Image (cartoon, helix red, strand yellow):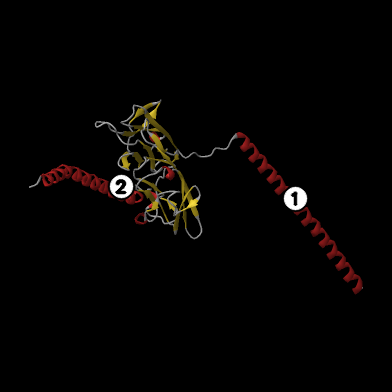
Amino acid sequence: MSSSERNRCATCSRSAPILSACWLLLLTMCVSSVALSVSAENHCSEYRYEHSLNTHHLQFTKEIPDREYGVLRQFKSLHCCGKGYRSIEWFKNNKPHPWSKDVSSFIVYPEAANQTIYSPRLEENDIGNYSCILRNETHAIKHEIELRLQDKLDNPMPTFRPKDLVVSVGESARFYCEAFVGNLYLPDATNEIVWNQMFDDHPHNVSDSMQVNVTREEGQIIGSYLSIPNIQTHHYGRYRCQIVSGNSAQKLNLSVLLSPVEVTAITDSQLSVLVYAMVILLLLVLLILIFWTVQQRTNSKKDNRCSAQFIASNEHENV
């Protein structure tokens, strides 16, 4: 074997591990992209509102974030979960989909019934205000999502804040909180999210409830559902969703209030007005009754006089 052939063989031997590593990296990226796409496809079919399962009118079927965060050159998806619609329209900064590359790289995901748009590789020009409009034959509903860039994260950033609820005893309640926590940079770092009921600013476990923690986009976004199937009086009050990122010691606290349905009480002034109105109404009815009685008596006297005159006239003619 010549020296040139030996050199080529040596070069091939040295490059083989590099090529293998490249192929492995490419395969890993493809598998990751497929996994993220499948996760995005299933997002709207999971954890839907209970009341939406057996109804068919135009509605959103789960909590939708008002703000989203993404990392440059990574996968990103936006969702608008609903049902009862004939069409879904997506807009970015009021420009309808489909978009040119200089507007947005997001594309509609048809496997998710157009409820999801995604970008395999987020770019700076993707940042902006997105909106979805769901329509049927007579109505339309709209939701807006602000998309921002976020790279190295210091603190958790809220994407969905829980909403206050007013619920009667015996009914069910559901809260949801969510935050962008980004990628973990330390091997032993973990993200935590927990619900507590607050009494005098002290956290307590929520009795007779169920907490389900969820993640999306490879754990960059974490959320938690708190479900209370049978509301009792001790459930009323303030709750806290606390999110802790493994990248930061700073905690994100999101508070929400659960209140009973109040029976509207009549104030003293309202009661006085009502009494005066009733008195005036009774007086009017009494006056109308008196007027009607007087009219009846007057008409009766006139009829009697006419009858007497008629009788007298007939007797005079007979004579």
| Residue type, mark 1 in image | Ile
Q: Residues within 10 Å of mark 1 (few under 14, many from 20)?
A: few
User: Residue 147: image x %, image y %?
Assistant: 43, 42
Side of 19 relative to 318 (left or right): left
Helix or strand or loop: what does disc 1 sit on? helix
Residue 144 disc label: none
User: Residue 219: image x %, image y %?
Assistant: 31, 39
Residue situated in front as seen by the camera: 262 or 51:
51
Mark found first going from the N terminus, 2 or 1: 2
Q: Is residue 131 above or below residue 187?
A: below
> Where is residue 197, by image quadrant?
top left
The residue pinned by badge 2 equals 36
Residue 219 shows up from this direction: yes
In three-dimensional space, the C-alpha distance between marks 2 and 1, rounded to whole angstroms, equals 84 Å
User: Residue 208: image x %, image y %?
Assistant: 32, 37
Q: Nearer the viewer, mark 2 or mark 1?
A: 2
Question: In the picture, which quadrant includes the C terminus?
Answer: bottom right
Q: Is residue 185 above or below residue 64?
A: above
Residue situated in front as seen by the camera: 274 or 159:
159
Residue 237 shows up from this direction: no
Query: Which residue is found at the position 43% from the left and 44% from the top?
Result: 125
Q: Is residue 18 above or below residue 237?
A: below
The residue pinned by badge 1 equals 290
